[in-house]
Amino acid sequence: MITLLAIVYNLTQPYIDLLRKKTAQKKYSSLTILHAPNLLGHPLGIAALFLLGMFVVPTDPVFFLFWFMMIAIASVQLTLNIWGMLETKFFGVQILSKLSFVVSSVAAILIIGEPLSGQRAFALGLATVGVVLFAWPTRTENTRLVWDRGIFFVLVSVVLSGFTTIFYKLATLHTASYSEFLTGRFVGDLIGWTAVWLFASFFIVRRNPFIELGRLIVDKHGGRMILVAAVSTLVGSWLIFKLPVTTISILSTLTIPTAYLIGRYSYDDHFTTRMWLGSLCIVVSVLLFIIPL
């Protein structure tokens, strides 16, 4: 059941990215876009934990050390991802960003010590081939990647994303229960992300973050993005707490077909033969990873 939830969760991520791109195109600050779901959703989450008697702040300070390190990296990584979406094709960003599962998986094995069987190692390799097939279409197609500044932003974001996931997972290992982890996440996000958001808004972007937040909430795409991203945050927290990083990482490749459908509808992207082969490799790799032979 949890694997199915992870699949559904990953299939919704391109839609959130689409909403982020649409709001970013309206000149909202990237950090306001990223932090708005926390500012609105986390206080409600804290109130719910209080009412349920589940509000338990982590007592291990290492949790917050890892969490604030994750926020520092994620603020740069997610900003670069949004910049990449603005500078290059939506579908291309979605394809290349999924290569972060390679970085996450390797880091999980080397740093966290997650076990990897021969079958799962083969599945990761096959998934990599599938993503590469998507990223290397024929020259005559509209989906051909243009190696511009946007792609550079995405590639740097990919590398940082792998380490973001690792610090995220390391933080969960220093909590005794999911309620403690969720409390720590809500509190840590409101402290860490708010500090980054306010500093960047006043001293780098040089605009009033509170006025911009109010505009974003009433914006058609911004309001929808805040709602969907806030719900996604809760689901993502549960998955990262329960599943190994390698499992979460390879399941993220399933977002590519969803990104294609969004790209096809919104940006007139088209499937090539190589992309069909890439889809087949990705689906087979996921099945090999989650179903032992």
Image (spheres, rainbow, N blue to C red):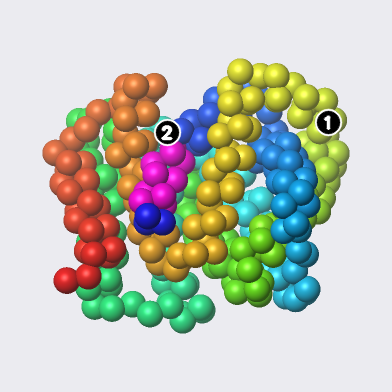
Question: Quick one: label 1, few (<14), some, or many (20+) residues within 10 Å?
Answer: few
Please name whichever residue, 259 or 88, is drawn nearer the observer in this view of the structure. Answer: 259
Rendered location of residue 17, percent (x, y):
50, 36
The rendered magenta stretch, by its main secondary structure, is classed as helix
| 131 part of magenta stretch | no
Nearer the N terminus, badge 2 or badge 1? 2
Kindly identify which residue carries mark 1: 210
Q: Quadrant of residue 251?
A: bottom left
Please report the bounds of the magenta region as a residue range.
Answer: 4-14
The local crowd at label 2, few if under 14, some if 14 to 19, many if 20 or more residues have their Cα within 10 Å, is: many
Please tell me which residue is depicted at 46% across the width and 73% down the height of the picture. Answer: 108
Q: Secondary structure at mark 1?
A: helix
Q: Secondary structure at mark 2?
A: helix
221 or 269: which is nearer to us?
221
Q: Disc 2 marks which amino acid?
A: Phe
Locate the C terminus and report the quarter of the image it occupies: bottom left
Q: Is residue 54 visible?
A: yes
Q: Give the residue number, with chain letter if any, for mark 2.
A: 90
